[in-house]
Image: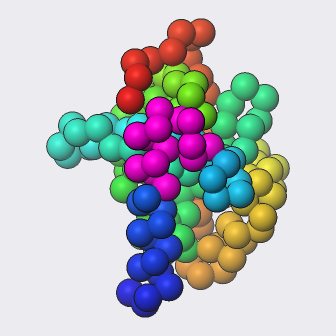
Amino acid sequence: MGLCARLQREFLRFHGWLYRSSAGRFGHHLIGVPTLLLETTGRQTGARRINALVYASDGSAFVVVASNGGSDRPPAWLLNLRANPGVALQRGRSRTAAQARVVAEDDPEYDRLWRLVNQANHGRYDVYQSKTRRSIPLVVLTPVGAGSVGAS
């Protein structure tokens, strides 16, 4: 892994840490794009896993991209939510339970959702897709119920 990729990974780690440790006071727009925290359950360990992800709103749902920076391997969080689609998300200081649905390239909604979230990320997902032969899936996160889940 090159220096630039390592620095980016470390900055993203710091961003997630700041978002979590500030209870959402900092981090929602820290990197110039809307970012949420996605909490999944480790499919093998059962441990809580939290990732900061760029998102786009689609009505009352949120769309995230399983790009893994354009890697040929999907991100672990995608494998986790495929095993258990019940997740939690945090936007700013607001937390809620949600249901995750993976949207593949052959889904009729894929192109519209891709354009929506790619625009929110200033075209970066097109760049990531050009780096891999893997079709990058999208995930629609639909909040469930009106209540929030516990604090981080």
Identify which residue is drawn at 41% across, 79% down.
Answer: 6
Horizontal side of 70 relative to 42 (left or right) equals right
Identify which residue is drawn at 47% across, 38% down.
Answer: 22
Horizontal side of 87 relative to 25 (left or right) equals left
Q: Nearer the viewer, residue 95 or 117?
A: 95
User: Is residue 73 shown above or below 100?
Assistant: below
Horizontal side of 55 relative to 151 (left or right) equals right
Horizontal side of 89 relative to 118 (left or right) equals left
Q: Nearer the viewer, residue 65 or 32?
A: 32
Image coordinates of residue 94 in percent, x first then y, are: 57, 25
Q: Quick one: quadrant of the N terminus? A: bottom left
Q: Is residue 138 visible?
A: no
Residue found at the very far top of the displayed protein? 146
Q: Nearer the viewer, residue 112 or 21?
A: 21
Image coordinates of residue 142 in percent, x first then y, are: 61, 27
Residue found at the very far left of the displayed protein? 45
Residue found at the very far bottom of the displayed protein? 2
User: Is residue 81 shown above or below 152?
Assistant: below
Image coordinates of residue 2 in percent, x first then y, are: 43, 90
Q: Nearer the viewer, residue 136 or 152?
A: 152
Identify which residue is drawn at 49% across, 44% down.
Answer: 19
User: Is residue 56 shown above or below 152?
Assistant: below
Image quadrant assignment for residue 48: top left
Q: Magenta region: which residues?
A: 15-28
Q: Quick one: quadrant of the C terminus? A: top left
Q: Is residue 110 magenta?
A: no
